[in-house]
Image (cartoon, helix red, strand yellow):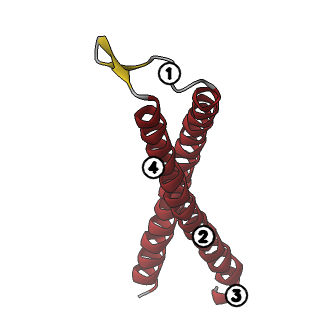
């Protein structure tokens, strides 16, 4: 019976460690995605600011594949604001995901601490 409980304990420990490692990796990926999207959003905000300062009769061109198409001023600003909103929503969702992953990682670490803290008392 003792080897069975030891084997079960090992399986549980391995599972908790794997959960902690996976959570930590996913958290790192989410953090990188957040910083990347935040950089993109700041660039868009700067572009919107610069375009808004221009006269409406200035010709604006939007890159489409290998060519450029002339876009009306209002359309260009509307598109950029739409992209900014999407990035903001993505960042908010990634922040929620990061908080969940951080909680999952902390819970796994707490479980490991509890197991190792109570293990000597059982023997």
Q: For the residue carrying disc 3, how many other residues have a C-alpha within 10 Å: few (<14), some (14-19), or many (20+)?
A: few
Q: Are marks 4 and 1 in contact (CB under 8 Å)?
A: no
Q: Are marks 3 and 2 in contact (CB under 8 Å)?
A: no
Q: Which residue is mark 4?
A: 86
Distance between the Cα atoms at labels 3 and 4?
53 Å
Name which of mark 4 and mark 1 comes first in the sequence. 1
Task: Please name the residue that numbered disc 3 is placed on.
Answer: 121
- Earlier residue among tags 3 and 4: 4
Q: Nearer the viewer, mark 3 or mark 2?
A: 2
Asked if the residue under mark 4 is in contact with the one under mark 2, i.e. CB atoms within 8 Å, the reply is no
Q: Nearer the viewer, residue 9 or 99?
A: 99
User: In the image, which disc is placed on residue 57?
Assistant: 1
Q: Quadrant of residue 59?
A: top left
Tell me how far mark 1 sits from mark 3, CA to CA.
79 Å
Where is residue 115 shown, x and y percent of the image? 62, 78
| Residue 17 percent across, percent down from the top left | 52, 62
Which sits earlier in the primary sequence, circle 1 or circle 2?
1
Mark 3 and mark 2 lie on one chain; the one further toward the N terminus is 2
Q: Secondary structure at mark 4?
A: helix
CB of mark 3 within 8 Å of CB of mark 4? no
Residue visible at 55% across and 58% down in the picture = 92
Say which element carries label 1.
Answer: loop
- Which residue is the site of mark 2? 103
């Amino acid at each position: 019976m003792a080897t069975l409980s030891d084997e079960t304990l090992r399986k549980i420990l391995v599972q908790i460690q794997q959960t902690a490692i996976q959570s930590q990796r996913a958290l790192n990926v989410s953090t990188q995605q957040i910083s990347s999207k935040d950089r993109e959003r700041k660039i868009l905000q700067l572009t919107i600011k610069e375009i808004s300062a221009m006269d409406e009769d200035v010709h604006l061109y939007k890159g489409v594949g290998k060519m450029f198409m002339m876009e009306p001023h209002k359309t260009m600003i509307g598109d950029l604001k739409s992209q900014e909103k999407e990035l903001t929503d993505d960042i908010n969702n990634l922040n929620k995901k990061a908080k969940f992953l951080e909680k999952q990682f902390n819970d796994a670490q707490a479980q490991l601490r509890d197991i190792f803290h109570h293990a000597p008392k059982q023997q």
